[in-house]
Image (cartoon, helix red, strand yellow):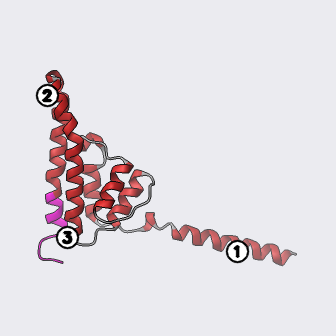
Amino acid sequence: MEDLRKEFEEFMQERCVTSESLNDEEHYDYPDYVEAINSELMPPSRSGVYISRWDLKMVGDAIDASIAMDARSRMYKMLMRSVHDRETMQRLLGAFASLIDAKIEPYRDMMEAYPSSAPIFQDKIEKAEQVKASFDRVLETYFPEGEE
């Protein structure tokens, strides 16, 4: 009986270690561009727009990357794992740029309809445009043309 208990405890320890090793996200070595884009795009205070989980899913669909619904940070990392070359990165950044354009269009409409709100929305639009401009820098820095 004691041997059975010992065997069971060893089995449970092995099983726990194995299940922990399956969740290797925190041990995955992400390229520098993942953090470069994340720091500019994901915080609404930096980008002027909120990127939701559904937005990330739609961006994933645009580059043929199937990602499961999860926390935003995990979804973003799963999405970035699907980028391996310049062409995919261009498609990804293009999808993010289109998403940003769609999200700032209501800001422009509000500025037009309510001119006194222009300073508030103009700030958000400027932040969004800066993020879109940073996409080109990321592409050229981490995926230089001709290095495929």
From what the image shows, is residue 34 above or below residue 117?
Answer: below
Distance from disc 2 to disc 3, alpha carbons, whole Å, reads 38 Å
The amino acid type, in three-letter code, at marker 1 is: Phe
Percent x, y of residue 48: 24, 40
Element type at mark 3: helix
Real-space CA distance between mark 1 and mark 3, rounded to the nearest whole angstrom: 45 Å
Q: Extreme right residue here?
A: 1
- Circle 2: element type: helix
* Mark 3 Cα-neighbour bin, 10 Å: few <14, some 14–19, many ≥20: some
Q: Residue furthest top?
A: 116
Choose top left, top right, bottom left or bottom right for residue 126.
top left
Mark 3, residue position: 86
State the residue position of label 1: 11
Along the line of sight, the residue nearer the viewer: 135 or 87? 87
Q: Quadrant of the C terminus?
A: bottom left
Q: Label 3 amino acid? A: Arg
Q: Nearer the viewer, mark 2 or mark 3?
A: 2
The residue drawn where x is 81% and y is 72% is 5
Q: Is residue 92 left or right of residue 8?
A: left
Q: Residue at x 58, y 72 (%)?
A: 18
**Residue 112, label in figure:** 2
Q: CA distance from mark 2 to mark 1?
A: 66 Å
Q: Nearer the viewer, mark 1 or mark 3?
A: 3
Q: Which residues are magenta?
A: 136-148
**Three-letter amino acid code of the residue under disc 2:** Glu
Q: Nearer the viewer, residue 112 or 40?
A: 112
Going from N to C along the chain, the mark reached first, 1 or 3, is 1
Mark positioned earlier in the residue sequence (2 or 1): 1
Residue 21 horizontal/vertical position (percent): 53, 70
- Give the class, few, some or many, for how many residues have Cα within 10 Å of label 1's Cα (few <14, many ≥20): few
Q: Secondary structure at mark 1?
A: helix
